[in-house]
Image (cartoon, rainbow, N blue to C red):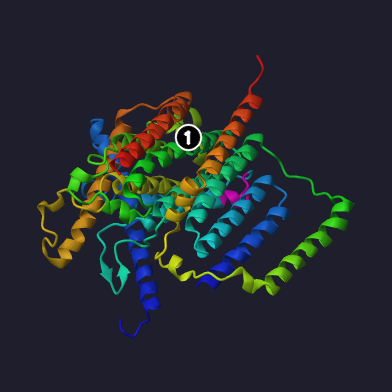
């Protein structure tokens, strides 16, 4: 079951990511990104991280990407021109990406045992509930970093308001 | 069912549940439209639909046939795939969230819970997540129609929905704090002790949260008094101006299915879900095993029905808000009050230990 979910939604995520790059209209690209994020949410869920999956859907696909689509709609952005890109990107990008891919797969294949294993059965049958554990960590063990992160975000919002306001 | 494996039983019963719930929901959608027209008519001193069938009861069928047989017009300047996908997204998202709603008491047949399609430990977050995805249907329909009025309508609807989503989510936090779980069955169980007295609306002292939820729910479903996206005097018909035939019907069904979902969530979160309002006045096995399995479903339906009537009553009573009033109300009033409610609830819970 889990393998089937992984194959279906992993392929969907990859297809969405490729479509994201190939589409010429910004709205189509934004929607492919939504597909990628939703598939990632399903993958999180199948790994037993149901809260992360829900947060991914609500925050990224439901709020961030809606704002993206909203902005594209408001600005009435047209189709983009397709260019050949820079030579440097081709010369460095493809070998670099291939090297990172090879390195990661080498590490995972050779040292897979030392990453440890996890039992997913409990999570799929609701026997384990990780929301309580997450909230223990967030609101008790790591309270100070969590609160300072929220203040950081508040500062960013205030900065955006100050930048967006017209000078009188 | 001894010759079937556990998984096969689960699979077949799940499909059965999905089909039954889908049929009931779609019928309920059709008859909510009729209910609205009838009640609205009586409130405005007229009869409402009364020609098709006894008391106009076959009107939804006639409406369905009419919409189905109409010509499916497609303007030339639309963005073709998105124009077709938008109503599908809207209707699918409206119907999916009903899958996590528990309709009755826990009743196991062959190891499968019969009165909920799926019992997920983050059921509430699933509903909120699907609601937030449903915005795409409205946003894309307005944009892909390539029509000024449709675009304005969808911009209004989108900004309204994402603004009120915050107040909606925050109003439910107090209930979640009291239940200590995001699983909808746990939330219902936390209100089951003494009938109506232990509902979150009364005994749980969440009536401020209920008020915020009510306002936010009207705005989320683009209904009066927040139906600016479809303000016909300004925007023709808003985001579905260019849609006809079944595509229009899908938006129409999505709106009413959303109403029913919102009513279900209100029932689960504030009105004690499928538990009896009489509490322990009735014995637990009242009326034998079959009747005592059906009674909770009836209570649930009655509560959802009451909430839908409230919807219609408000539509018949209140005039439409202005757009700046809508935004100011959502951001400057509902959101701070929702946060104050969370603080008060968590303080009380912390002091009680």
Relative to the observer, which residue lies in front, A27 or B293? B293
Q: Chain of mark 1?
A: B
Residue B140 drawn at (x, y percent): 57, 45
Query: Quadrant where the C terminus of chain A lies?
Result: top right
Q: Is residue A82 shown above or below B203?
A: below
Q: Is residue B250 visible?
A: yes
Q: What secondary structure is marked by label 1?
A: helix
Residue drawn 57% across the image and 40% down it:
A149
Residue B292 drawn at (x, y percent): 16, 62
Residue B283 drawn at (x, y percent): 11, 58
Q: Is residue A88 left or right of B156 when viewed as pictured?
A: right
Question: Which secondary structure is most common in the magenta stretch?
Answer: helix
Relative to the observer, which residue lies in front, B184 or B190? B190
Residue B191 drawn at (x, y percent): 25, 49
B83 in magenta = yes
Q: Is residue B53 visible?
A: no
Residue drawn 83% across the image and 49% down it:
A83
Task: Report the span colored magenta.
Answer: B78-84
A1 in magenta = no
Relative to the observer, which residue lies in front, B19 or A167? A167
Q: Is residue B145 left or right of A167 when viewed as pictured?
A: left
Residue located beneath label 1 in the image: B229
Residue drawn 33% across the image and 41% down it:
B350
- The total number of labels drawn is 1
Single out the residue that lies furthest toward the top. Answer: A168
Single out the residue that lies furthest toward the bottom. Answer: B3
| Quadrant assignment, res B335 | top left
Pointer 1: residues within 10 angstroms few (<14), some, or many (20+)?
many
């Amino acid at each position: 079951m889990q393998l089937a979910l992984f194959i279906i939604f992993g392929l969907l995520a990859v297809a969405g990511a490729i479509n994201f790059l190939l589409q010429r209209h910004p709205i189509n690209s934004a929607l492919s990104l939504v597909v990628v994020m939703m598939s990632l949410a399903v993958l999180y869920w199948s790994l037993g991280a149901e809260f992360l999956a829900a947060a991914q859907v609500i925050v990224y696909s439901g709020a961030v990407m809606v704002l993206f689509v909203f902005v594209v709609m408001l600005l009435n952005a047209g189709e983009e021109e397709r260019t050949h890109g820079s030579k440097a990107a081709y010369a460095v990008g493809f070998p670099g990406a291939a090297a990172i891919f090879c390195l990661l797969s080498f590490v995972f294949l050779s040292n897979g045992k030392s990453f440890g294993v996890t039992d997913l059965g409990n999570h799929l049958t609701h026997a384990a509930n990780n929301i309580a554990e997450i909230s223990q960590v967030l609101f008790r063990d790591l309270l100070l970093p969590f609160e300072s992160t929220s203040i950081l975000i508040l500062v960013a919002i205030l900065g955006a308001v100050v930048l967006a306001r017209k000078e009188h | 069912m001894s010759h079937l494996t556990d998984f096969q039983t689960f699979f077949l019963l799940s499909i059965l549940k999905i089909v039954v719930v889908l049929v009931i929901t779609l019928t309920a959608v059709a008859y909510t439209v009729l209910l609205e027209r009838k009640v609205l008519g009586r409130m405005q001193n007229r009869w409402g639909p009364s020609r098709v069938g006894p008391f106009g009861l076959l009107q939804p069928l006639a409406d369905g046939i009419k919409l189905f047989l109409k010509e499916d017009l497609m303007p030339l300047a639309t963005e073709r795939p998105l124009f077709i996908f938008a109503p599908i997204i809207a209707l699918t998202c409206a119907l999916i969230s009903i899958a996590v709603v528990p309709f009755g008491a826990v009743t196991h047949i062959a190891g499968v819970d019969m009165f909920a399609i799926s019992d997920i430990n983050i059921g509430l977050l699933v509903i909120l997540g699907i609601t937030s995805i449903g915005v795409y249907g409205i946003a894309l329909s307005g944009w892909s129609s390539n029509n000024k009025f449709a675009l304005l309508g969808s911009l209004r609807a989108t900004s309204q929905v994402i603004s009120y989503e915050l107040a909606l989510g925050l109003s439910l936090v107090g209930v979640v704090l009291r239940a200590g779980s995001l699983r909808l069955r746990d939330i219902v169980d936390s209100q089951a002790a003494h009938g109506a007295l232990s509902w979150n609306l009364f005994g749980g002292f969440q009536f401020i949260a209920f008020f915020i939820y009510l306002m936010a729910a009207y705005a989320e479903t683009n209904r009066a008094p927040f139906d600016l996206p479809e303000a016909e005097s300004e925007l023709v018909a808003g985001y579905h101006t260019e849609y006809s035939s079944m595509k229009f019907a899908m938006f129409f069904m999505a709106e009413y299915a959303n109403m029913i979902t919102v009513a279900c969530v209100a029932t689960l979160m504030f009105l004690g879900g499928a538990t009896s309002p009489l509490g322990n006045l009735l014995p637990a096995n009242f009326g034998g095993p079959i009747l005592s399995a059906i009674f909770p479903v009836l209570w649930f339906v009655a509560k959802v029905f009451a909430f839908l009537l409230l919807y219609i009553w408000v539509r018949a009573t209140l005039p439409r808000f202005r757009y700046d009033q809508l935004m100011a109300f959502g951001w400057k009033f509902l959101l701070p009050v929702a946060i104050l409610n969370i603080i008060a609830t968590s303080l009380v819970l912390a002091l009680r230990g």
